[in-house]
Amino acid sequence: MDDLRGMGVANACGLRPILRRALPATALLLAWLAIAGALAGCDHRQAGVIELSDALLLKVDDVRPPPEEAPWKPQRLPDDWRERHPGESGLAWYRFTVEVPQPADHDYGFYLTAALSNSQLFVNGTLAGQSGDLRGEPPDRWEAVQLVAVPRALLRPGANTIDLRIHVEPGSEGGVGTVLFGPHETLYARQFRDQIGYTIGPAAASLTTLAMGFFILILWLRVRDDWNYLIFAIASILWGLHTAVTLMPRAPLPAPHYAVWWNAVYVIWVVMLCIFSVRFAKAAWPRYEKAAIGFAAASVPVLYASAAAGALDPVATAMRLGAIGAAVVALFAVVGNVLRTRDSLSWILLATGTVAAAFGLHDWMAAMDPDDLRPMFLVPYLALFFLALVGWIMIDRFVKTLNQYETLNAELERRVAEKSRALEFEVTLQAEARRDAEAANVAKSRFLAAASHDLRQPLHALGLFASALNQRSQDAQSRELTERINQSIEALESLFSEVLDVSRLDAGAITAEPQPVALQPLFDRIANDLSSAAEEKNLALRFVPTARLARTDPVLLERILRNLVSNAIRYTESGGILVGVRPRSGKLALEVRDAGIGIAIEHQARVFDEFYQIGNVERDRRLGLGLGLSIVKRLCDLLGHPISLASLPGRGTTFRILLEKVESSAQAGASPPEQAAEASLQGARIVVIDDERDVRDSMVALLRAWGCVVFAFPTSDAAIHFMASGSSRPG
C-alpha cells in the first residue's frame, strides 16, 4: 500500500496541490450539506406548524367518525401497534383537535411523518383524503410519509376535529407517527425534504457506491497490484446493493430469508471496510483480521439458526452491534497511523473512520428506538466520505505515478542519448577498423597477386626436379616413390594456384575481355583434357555439340567450365556428366549436369563460400581446399554471368550459367592455342634462360634426362654472348 499513501510533501507547481486539497474538501462539504439538509427535514418548528403528538384512540369498526361520547382513550404518538398493541389488528380511529385562526386565508395540510398503515382523513366529519385501499396492502416504503391537503372550506374558526381512520393487517407492522398540521405549502416543502433524506438521498448514495465499487473492481482487474482494492471494491458493491434493496417498495425475499440476507450483508461489508482500513493504516493485526473474517463468515448460519429458534431480531441486532464494534476497533489502528505518519491522507482516513463509527452507532440506536417508526439512517451517506477518501487515493497515486514516469522518461532519454553517443563512437571505430581490414586484405591480395610468379617458381622447380628424378629411377620401388612425390607436388601446385587465383581476383589483377566466343572448341579442349579422368572412374563424359556463340572472355569461361566439370567428376561415382548449352530467356544457359551425390538444401547457399566443403570433415587435401566453386562464382561475377544450381541428394546436381548470346556470324575470338604435338627431343641442342637458379637447374636436369644437349644461362645477354663466341650452337 506504500504507493497508495500520500507522500505528505506537496508538489510546488501544477495541478497536484490543487487536486489534493480541493477534491477531498469538496466531497466532504457536499456530504455534510446533504446530511445537514436531510436532518433539517426533521425540524418541524416552522411558522404556523403544529405538532400533534397527543390523540384519542378508539378501536371500532365504524364507517363514520365515532361520536364524542364513545369510549375514547388517550394515546401518545408515535403509536407502534407491534410494540403497544401486540397481537391486535383491524380498524381504529385517531382523533385530533386543532385550532384554526379566523379567518383561514390559506389551505392547510395534515402531514403523517410516519404512516405504516393505509388511512382515511375526516375533517369535521367530512372525508378530506385517503391513501390507498383501506384494507389493501400497506404503504410502500417510499410512501411512508403522507401529506393530505385540507381545503380551507372544510375548516371553521376555532376548534376543529380531525379523525384518522387506519387499518392494521394481522401480523404486519402498523401504526401512526407524529402528525404535523399547518400551512400546506410549508408542509409540502417539509415532505420534499423528508423524501430527499429518507429516499432520494440514500438512493443516490447507493448508486454512487455501486458505481464506485464497480469502477474500482474494473481497475483492480486491469492492474491487480493490490488486493486491498479488491476488498474495498467488493465492500462498496455489497454496501450499495444493501442500501438499494432497503429502499425497494417490497422485500425481494420472503421471511426469514430477507432479514437474514439484509443483516448478513450489512455485517460483511462493514467487516470488509474495517479490514481495508486496518491494512491501509499499515497495522499488522492478523488476529483481528482472522476474527473479523470468521465473524462475517458465521453471520449467515448464525442468523438462520436464530430464525429457527425464534430469536432472529435480538441476534441480528447483536450482530450489527458487533460489526459496529469491529469498526471502532479498526478506528484505533487508524489513530495509530495518524500518530506515526501525520500526513493528510491519514487524517482524512481518521475523519472518515470516525464519521463511520458515529453514523453506525446512530443508525443502531435509531433502529432500537421503539418510538421512531421511520428512523433516518445515516450510513448510506457515509459513501460520500469514502468516495472522497478513495478519490484522494486515486489522485495521489496517479500524480505520484505520473511524476515517476516523468522522472523515468527523463532518465531514459539521458541514457538513450549516452548510448547513442557511445554507439556512434563504436560505429565510427568499427568503420575505421573495417576500412583498415579491407585495406589490409586488398594489400594482402595485391601482394599475393604480384608475388605469384616468385611464389610459383620454387614449386615449379620442385616439380621439374621430381620429373628429372623420375627419369633416372631404375628400379620399380624408386619409380613408385618418385611417382608419389610427383602426385603430392601436383596437388600442392593445384591448391597453391587456387589460393593465388583467389588473391588475384580479390586484388583486381584479373580483368575480363569479353568477345564473341565459339563454344564448341571450348567443349573439345575440355573433353580432350578431362576424358581420361572420367574414364578412370568409369564415368561417361559427354558434351552436346553446339554451333552457338556467346559474348564472354574465352580464357575465363574455360577456367569456369573446367572447374565445374572437374568438380562433377570428383563427386560422381557412377553414371556420367553431361555438358551442353540451350537458349533460355533470350540468353544461353550453359549447363553441367552430373549424377553424383547431390547437395542438400541446407548446404546449397554456402557451396560458393571459400573453404566450404561437404563430406570432407577430415580436410583431406587431395579433395582440395573448397576454393573451386568460390573461384567459379568470382569469375562469373567478374564476367556478369549469373550462376545457379539445382540439386537433389542422391540424384545429382546441375550448375547453370547464363551467357550473353551472339546472334551474328562474326568471327569468334581466338581460343587458347592448341598444344603442339609432341616430338622427339633426343640429341636436340637447347638453351635455357631463367633468373631462378633452382628453376634453371631443374629444367636442365629434366631436358638432359630426355637426351637433350642443354646450355643454361641466367640472362639473355649471357646466352647471346656465349653463342656469339662460336663455342657451340644449339641445334
Image (cartoon, rainbow, N blue to C red):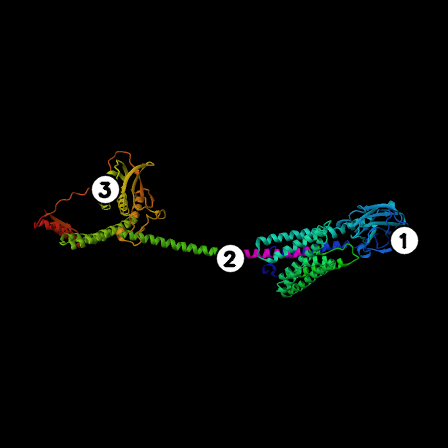
Q: Kindly report which numbered mark, 1 or 2, lies closer to the viewer in this rendering.
A: 1
Classify mark 2: residues with Cα within 10 Å, few (<14), some (14-19) or many (20+).
Answer: few
Q: Secondary structure at mark 3?
A: helix
Mark 3 vs 2, N-terminal side: 2
Residue 499 sits inside the magenta stretch: no
- Disc number for residue 481: none
Q: Which residue is mark 1?
A: 71
List the single residue furthest toward the front: 308
Say what amino acid the circle numbered 3 marks.
Ala
Q: Nearer the viewer, residue 493 or 421?
A: 493
Say what amino acid the circle numbered 1 marks.
Pro
Q: Secondary structure at mark 1?
A: loop
Could you tell me residue 329's position as x and y percent? 67, 64
Residue 394 sits inside the magenta stretch: yes
Q: Which residue is mark 2?
A: 411
Q: Which residue is mark 3?
A: 527
Could you tell me residue 118's position as x and y percent? 80, 48
From this viewpoint, is residue 283 visible?
no
The number of discs equals 3
List the single residue furthest toward the left: 727
Say what amino acid the circle numbered 2 marks.
Glu
Q: Which residues are magenta?
A: 383-409
Classify mark 1: residues with Cα within 10 Å, few (<14), some (14-19) or many (20+).
Answer: few
Where, quadrant-wise, is the N terminus in this rendering? bottom right
Q: CA distance from mark 1 to mark 2?
A: 92 Å
Q: Nearer the viewer, residue 3 or 299?
A: 299
Q: Are marks 1 and 2 in contact (CB under 8 Å)?
A: no
